[in-house]
Amino acid sequence: MSSNEFDLIRRYFWGLGGGEAIRLGIGDDAALLDLPPGEVLVASVDTLVEGVHYPEDTFPEDVGYRALAVAASDLAAMGASPLACTLALTLPAADELWLQAFSEGLARACADCGLPLAGGDTTRGPATVITIQVFGACPAGAALRRDGARPGDRVCVTGTVGDAAAALAILEERWHPGPEAAAVLLERFNRPTPRLALGERLRGAATAAIDVSDGLLADLGHIAAASGVAIALDSAALPLSPALAAAGEQGRAWALGGGDDYELAFTLPAEAALPEGCTHIGEVREGSGLSVDGEPADASGYRHF
Ligand code: ADP
Ligand code: MG
């Protein structure tokens, strides 16, 4: 790499390193990470392509924040404790204003998620592409998988669902709520909150878990299929933010079918206590497939729409 590129990395990314797990970080050929004794490495990677995964006019701070938050959500869904991340960045040009703002958003997410930057790669290319790999740790056998749901378990979800789909409708000018509601929903899309602490707490309690990236029904469909069970949801129980509750049937459709919320959906045995901030939205049953209010449903939504 040229000294120019190295200056960019030093200026914008060097400060995002540090942290207990990184024995050797940015600056060598590869990073060395410490893994707690007896634990397994949990690894996941996600890519954001400008214009595909976020609108081109998104603030670069939000792009940086969201890129890491989205990747970190997969660690939460596995019940992993965060260790570190790496960043592969493809840019059409070395736009320093963009890099400054992007790295500030990324730094905030690194701090919020406990995922310091251990290294990366920087290349020139025809479009902005951001790939973030995240590393976590978990005792072998304790990871939250998709295949453990059992008939009789409760189906639960963290936070509120449908907000990111509503934000997308605002960005695409399909929906026009008041400015206050719009600001709250756009923040939910641009700055998702990966549920890392809750994921760790669910180890040994939840029988299955997934993060809601494609939509509640689509993602619960993955748990149902992997576990060989049916999942029945009660639409009246869905946790909706005030703006979505006010949007009536459309709000519930976003909650069931919309993606990008990065909440955790999980199954909990009947005897386990429901953690704070979580809502009981349905039941695991014998059989296969999904239903909402007793009606068969598919991943795209439910039949009423
Ligand atoms: P190599 O050519 O050996 O692959 P690079 O020149 O790509 O090394 O990177 C030099 C150092 O800078 C490495 O430690 C790498 O991890 C780090 N690095 C490169 N790009 C980034 C980035 N976007 N974010 C963080 N670290 C980076
Ligand atoms: Mg390299």
Image (spheres, rainbow, N blue to C red):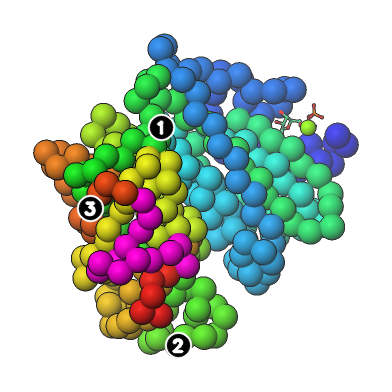
First to last magenta residue range = 288-300
Three-letter residue code for mark 3? Glu
| Residue drawn at point x = 27 percent, y = 46 percent | 286
Residue denoted by label 2: 176
Three-letter residue code for mark 1? Ala
Circle 3 or circle 1, nearest the eye:
3
Secondary structure beneath label 2: loop
Tag 3–tag 1 contact (CB < 8 Å): no
Residue denoted by label 3: 283
Tag 3–tag 2 contact (CB < 8 Å): no
Residue denoted by label 1: 80
Q: Mark 2 or mark 1: name the one nearer the start of the chain.
A: 1
**Which quarter of the rendering shows the C terminus?**
bottom left
- Percent position of residue 152, x then y: 19, 44
Q: Residue furthest right?
A: 2
Location of residue 10 (image quadrant): top right
- Percent position of residue 213, x then y: 48, 55
